[in-house]
Image (spheres, helix red, strand yellow):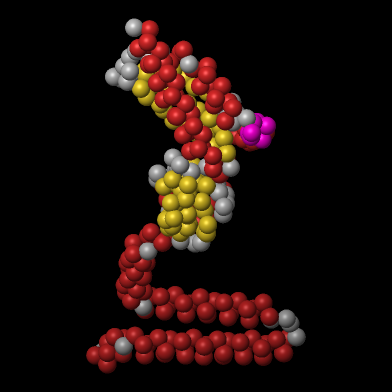
Amino acid sequence: MNYLSTIMENKLVVTIAVILVTFAIRYLALKLVGKNQRRNGQDQRSLKSNIKNFLIFVLVLLLINLWADEIQRFAFSLAAFAVAIVLATKEFIQCIIGFFYWMSSRPFRVGDWIEVDQYAGEVSQIDWIKTTVLEVNIDTYQYTGKTLSIPNNRFITSAVQNLNFMKRYAIHSFVLVRDDSNINPFSFIQQLRSNAKLYCHDFEDVALRYNQIIEHKMGIKITGPKPTIEVGTTELGHIKLEVTIFCPTDQTMEIEQKITADFFALCQGEQTESVLAE
């Protein structure tokens, strides 16, 4: 009895014995069926196949029952290992999922301007893990010289703005403020609007076509191409002019400086006339 228990504890020996016995029974059964087939002249291939499958099924059940504890421990270890791997590589997995999201939806392409988490720039390269972006100052529309590496998982967790239409033409808005209460901006607002329109005259036709293309593509009405200037006041009661122009991206700051210079010059003229009148 002790000898039998010792053998049963050595599962490897028992496993080999079970496999040998199973294949021996399989060999004898198939040989017996083969003799009957030659004697009776009947096709026994179906019976042979059933015997093979049945014995393999029995062998698998015996081995699973024999190694049940080890299989269970291995499964738990494998699951724990898999969980550890997933936790350790969670960010990389999310980045790969973000890459597949980009592949399926294509919200932008290489060469487009995008904005993600307040970072804006031109997409220069996209791989499985990250997207390389050449940073652009969204206020001046100029390259900063910095290169950003944005993990692809940001495309799932953050809003991605495609600014590609701003690469050539931009809706540029800026505010002009003057704290002199003696100035009446309505006395020169028309002159300022005429000056702004003059600065945008050279590209007016191209801007109109580009504006129409953007509106058709986006399905909405956008500002432009004519410049607009609205008069208002700040919370402190100072005079405020809100200027919006639709112009080539590389000319935004130049035109802004011209309009700003005209504004202060007109304010100075209005102030001089007010002093002379007094």
Horizontal side of 180 relative to 115 (left or right) equals left
> Magenta stretch mostly in which secondary structure?
helix
- Residue 152 visible in the displayed image: no
Quadrant where the image shows the N terminus:
bottom left
Q: Quick one: which residue is furthest to the left in this view? A: 2
Rendered view: 271 above or below 7: above
Q: Position of residue 162 (x, y in %)?
A: 52, 43
Horizontal side of 120 relative to 80 (left or right) equals right
Q: Nearer the viewer, residue 228 or 101?
A: 228
Horizontal side of 209 relative to 150 (left or right) equals right
> Which residue is located at x 54 percent, y 76 percent?
54
Rendered view: 36 above or below 129: below
Q: Nearer the viewer, residue 183 or 72?
A: 183
Identify the image quadrant of residue 148.
bottom left
> Which residue is located at x 68 percent, y 80 percent?
45
> Which residue is located at x 46 percent, y 61 percent?
129
Rendered view: 80 above or below 189: below
Q: Quick one: which residue is furthest to the front in this view? A: 276
Give the residues drawn in magenta, as a range: 202-208
Q: Nearer the viewer, residue 155 or 124?
A: 124
Identify the image quadrant of residue 77.
bottom left
Q: Nearer the viewer, residue 66 or 158?
A: 158
Identify the image quadrant of residue 147.
bottom left
Q: Position of residue 82 (x, y in %)?
A: 37, 67
- Residue 69 visible in the displayed image: yes
Quadrant where the image shows the C terminus:
top left
Q: Quick one: which residue is furthest to the top in this view? A: 278
Q: Is 20 included in the stretch rendered in magenta? A: no
Q: Is 207 included in the stretch rendered in magenta? A: yes
Q: Quick one: which residue is furthest to the right in this view? A: 41
> Which residue is located at x 58 percent, y 80 percent?
52
